[in-house]
Structures are given as C-alpha cells and as structure tokens.
Amino acid sequence: MSAAVEILPPDTRDESSRRALAVHRVREDFPILSQKVRGKPLVYLDNAATSQKPQAVIEALQRYYAVENSNVHRGIHLLSEQATQAYEAARARVQRFVNAASTREIIFTRGTTESINLVAASYGRRHLQPGDEVIISWMEHHSNIVPWQMLCEEKGAILRVVPINDDGEFLLQEYEKLLNPRTRLVSVTHVSNALGTINPIGEIIAMAHRWDVPVLVDGAQAAPHLPVDVQALDCDFYAFSGHKLYGPTGIGVLYGKARLLDAMPPYQGGGDMIRSVTFEKTIYNALPYKFEAGTPNVAGAIGLGVAIEYLEQFGLENLAAYEHELLSYATPAISRIPGVRLIGTAREKTSVLSFVLDGVHPHDVGTILDREGIAIRTGHHCAQPVMDRFGVPATARASFAFYNTREEVDALVAGIHKVIEVFS
Amino acid sequence: MSDLRELYQEVILDHHKNPRNFRILEGANRTAEGYNPLCGDRITIYLQLQGDVITDISFQGVGCAISKASASMMTTRLKGKTRAEAEALFGKFHRVVTGQRDLAPDGPELGKLEVFAGVSEFPVRVKCASLAWHTLRAALDGGSQTVSTE
C-alpha cells in the first residue's frame, strides 16, 4: 500500500505538486504513454474503450510465451504443470479481487460480452418461458441489450427497459414498477460506458431479490474504477473484461454464484469442460471448468492477474479517489467552454465526460483533437438508445484513468477551443 | 494545423453551415437513405429524374461537416447532369478522396469538389465524404433499401 500514499499523500506538503509527481511516476509504468502521436505527446483519454497496459503486464505476456507456454490441465510435464499453476493462481487473484466466495465461481471468458452471452445462453435458455420477462436499463451497452433480445425472441419472452432521467440516472421507482411475477432476470450495468453514471446497484439487486429474481451486473466499466465486492452486493452474476482493467484483450471474467452455476447447463461443448466422454454419454466437469470449453486464453488470464496485482499496490479506493478528483477538475473546465453540453450529469459518476459541441459533429471534434495528439472516442459508444434518449446522434467522450493528469485535462480544453476556432 | 485546414477548408465549412438544396424535394421520383453506423450520420437524397437527366436534387439529414458539405456540394454539381456524368464524377471523386487519383488521372474535372482532396489524409473520414455519393447511386438505381457505409 506504500504507493497509495504517494498518490494521495497526507497534506504535509504542497499537495498538488506531490501528487503530480506521483502520477508522473505512475505514468512511467505505462510505456505507451510516453510516445508522441502526430508530433504531439499522446494524451490518451479513451480509457472507457480500452485502457493501457503497465510494463508488468507486458512483461508477463512476454515471459509466458518465452519460457512458460504450455497447455493447462492436461500435461504431465513440468511446463504444463507450471502453466496450470499460473492460470489457476490468476483465477484465485480474480476471486480475491471481487471477493467471491470460491474460485469455482470465477469463469474465464473472452470478455464481458461473452460473459453476458454465456448467462443468456445457459441460464436464460433454461429458465425462460413464453411470456416471461427480462429487465435491462436504458443505458445499457449493446452487449447487454442484444443477447437478451435474441433470447427473448427465441423464447417468446419480453424485454423490459428501465428508463433514465435527464441526468442519465437509473429510475428506481420505475424499475420497481417493472418487477413482477413474470420477471426471470435483471441485467443492468454497474457503470454506464456512455454517461459514466454509477448505478445504485445494491438497491437494484435487493429489489429484484424480493421477487426471487437473479441479477447480472455488467461490470465492464465499474471493475477498473470502483472496488467491487460481489458478496456485499449479493449479485448473482458479475461480468467484466481484462482489457479495460489494464490487462490484455481477449480475457474476461464471469462471476456467478456457485448454486446457480452448478444448476446451469454448459455454454459450449469441447475439451476441458468434460469429465468423461463416450458416444452414449458425456459427464461434464465441475465448476468452473464446465464453462471453459477448449484451450483457454492462458496468457491472457496470467496477464489479467498481473494487472490486478499492479492495481492492488495502490488500492482501488485510492485510484477511484484520484480519478474522482480529476473528474471534479475536468467537469467545470469542459462545461464552461461556450457551446459545450455535457451528456450525463448524474450525481454519482466515474471519470467519463460525454459532451456535444454546438454546431460541430463529434466526429469533427475527434478528428481535430486527434491532430493535437488527444485520443477520445466519438460516436454512439455502442449505446444507441442512450443517444436517442438525449436526442443526439453521437457524443464526444473523454474517459480518464489514474494515469491521466490535470495537464492532460488542460490539453483537452485547449483542443476543444481549437475545434471552435476551426469552425468559427 | 495545415492538414486540418486542408480538410476543413472555408468552402467546406460554408456548405456545412449553410447547406444548399437542404430540403425535401416535392415531386421527387427517386429517394434513397444513407447511413454511416460509425458516426451515426444519416442522409436522404431526393431526385427528380427525367429520362437520364437529374433535373432536380436535394438532401436532408444529420452528419458531420464533411458528410454534410459533401452532400451539399454534390447536389449543386449534379443538377442537370446525366446519370452517366454523375457516375463518372463519383468515380473520380472516390479516387481523389481515397488518394488514388493516379489510378485513372483522366475523367471529369472535379472543379470545386477538389476541396475534398484533403480527406485522403484522414482515412477514417473517407466514408463521411462518400456517404452522399453512395446514397445518390442507390437513388439512381431505384433501390429503396438504406445504404450503409459498413
């Protein structure tokens, strides 16, 4: 925890200069951040799309392929034994990271999207009948809409959508009205990728449980920015991705309560998910392997474990506090630029600033900022219903991580002024 | 800044702010919709086609400066042109915005449409510049389906 003290030091000295110094030290851990793009220092503000990787993760991947690579759970030789150990150690690290009760409840997937699809295909297909209902919210990413649409279409079930208010906040009282005896599942995001809204996920879960309805939480945007305790939340499923958590792409996690996972049919058939196979009968493997058909992304899992280890040296609370402070600095700085309208002004937010600029399409904003070395996301952020809700075709979105600085916020502000200048 | 100015030339910004022929065309006998899922740009092209001649043309929609200016300038250029002339212009336009002018240096002069040459330095924006033209082609072909740049 010593590094955490550096990030948020006690106010014994000039606080801002010490913090800036510490952040610049943190930045040295991320090799990509020191490069120039288009002749300017890279200002990477697209962390909600994917985060950058610390050297420790890059080295772990390199080391794995250089000296450890082997298949897991089957070899009798030393390398396979070591790879298996490293893979399972990563699982144990993920388990502690989200405070799951057991490693049996941690399933490695390709990412949040596959985690959600797994639940839709396995739990959903098993439990949905014609006329049953699934509840999602208006602020979901397409990956937490489409799997449920597909499932509902297949089953003759109905998709219900919880509305949001003009600040982009989840409307609990509307949600309460949607819960009923036909509700079979609630699937809601913890944090909105397009708006940054932090949902009252504990209350959402408690309200569903009063109807004995399980809840899947899309944690893709929350896991990198908030401490997550699946037991305290009492969520039934929790899905997140490695690449947004400073880890590799192609690795993700589905947490599920063992009681539910045990009763669910497999998602895919293949190697590793079976105990024995004859042409007459196949006996499935125990958790979590029942849901991990085929050779898994061993390097990815190890890389994710290392990313979590890296984050834990600071403490997620401290990273969240730093990012919140950066948001508090950036929000007024951006919103007071003439012509800027923030999209997503919830009271509880992670460090996401979605905005539109009067008379300028977000894509033009993005192109001009790009020439300044500033990487933001422009478009609908795979959340078209959110765009429709706010009556905009797209937004420009700056999303911050703990390695971003106030200077980078200042660069963004200057960049937006340049956009205005070009379009004046 | 120089390549930005190359992209966002005065004439492009002017057509973006004051798009020409930006209306629904009464009496249009061909329309088509275009959609760029990447940026959410939507455009509708209205044509009055008499025989092979575009006697009138207009558009409506939402989009970035490049797509809107491109649509606006396209409509001003194509009024009174034949289908074949429109096709030839699109071919040349497309080669220029994708930086492949040398592939077929002949063909019609782009004239004012030359301002879009700067787009070739911004590969992700080529779709913005060509959306209106793809939609025009769909309208000429008489299809009713939305054309997509994806």
Image: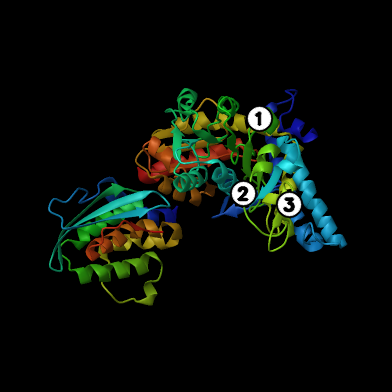
Label 3 sits on a secondary structure element that is: loop
Residue A216: quarter of image: top right
Of tags 1 and 3, the one toward the viewer is 3
> At x 26% / y 65%, what residue is drawn?
B111
Q: How many marks?
A: 3
Would residue A50 be found to the left or right of residue A366 on screen?
right
User: Which is more toward the observer, A61 or A329?
Assistant: A61
Q: Name the residue type under label 1.
A: Asp
Q: In the orientation shown, which residue stands out farthest toward the right?
A: A78
User: Which is more toward the observer, A97 or B125?
Assistant: A97
Residue A285: mark: 3
Which quadrant: the N terminus of chain A? top right
Subunit bearing disc 3: A
Label 2 sits on a secondary structure element that is: loop
Find disc 1 in the rendering and name its residue: A234
Residue neighbourhood size for the residue with mark 1, other residues' Cα within 10 Å, grouped as few (<14), some (14–19), many (≥20):
some
Q: Name the residue type under label 3.
A: Asn
Q: Is residue A179 above or below residue B26?
A: above
Subunit bearing disc 2: A
Would residue A6 be found to the left or right of residue A39 on screen?
right
Find disc 2 in the rendering and name its residue: A111
Label 1 sits on a secondary structure element that is: loop
- Residue B47: percent from the left, percent from the top? 18, 58
Of tags 2 and 3, the one toward the viewer is 3
